[in-house]
Image: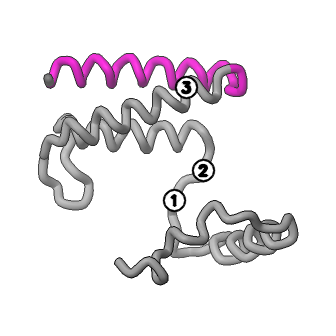
Amino acid sequence: MNQENDPMDNLGTHRSPEERREAAEKYTEMVTGSPNEPMPKVDMSTFVMSLCSSVLVYLGEVPDPESGETTYNLDLARHTIDLLGMLEEKTKGNLTPDEEEMLNNILFELRMKYVQKC
């Protein structure tokens, strides 16, 4: 990819509070109330469950929702489990008791399933 066209170039670039607020407002306008978006509200629980679902697909525990096929990708499973572990570490003390319990239980179960697959 040509470096001058790299979409990652501007990510992480310092933006003024006004620019960030304007971007957030535009985003909210675009996605709020869209009848074509039957997605659940984004919160910690749905985020963790989404990652958990991905791991279950990567471990071959459930079929891929798009293709309907059951496949294995232990590298992606491990990477996503590690991501959940990082979230557990970085959010320690900032989760509700229910969120913390859910994350701990999911991590335990996914780690055990991963070990069984290896």
Of callouts 3 and 1, the N-terminal one: 1
Residue 49, horizontal then vertical, whole percent: 45, 38
Residue designated by label 2: 42
The reply to whether dot 1 and dot 2 touch (C-beta < 8 Å) is: yes
- Is the residue 38 above or below the residue 95 in the image? below
Q: What stretch is highlighted in magenta?
A: 93-117
Residue designated by label 1: 39
Residue 81, horizontal then vertical, whole percent: 37, 31
Amino acid type of disc 1? Met
The mark lying in front, picked from 2 and 3, is: 3
Q: Is the magenta stretch mostly helix, strand or loop?
A: helix
Q: Residue at x 56, y 37 (%)?
A: 45
Amino acid type of disc 2? Val
User: Tag 3's secondary structure?
Assistant: helix
Amino acid type of disc 3? Glu
Front residue of 45/6: it is: 6
Front residue of 32/51: it is: 51
User: Tag 1's secondary structure?
Assistant: loop
User: Tag on residue 88?
Assistant: 3
Q: In 3D space, how far apart are the residues under numbered discs 3 and 1 (Cα atoms)?
A: 24 Å
User: Tag 2's secondary structure?
Assistant: loop
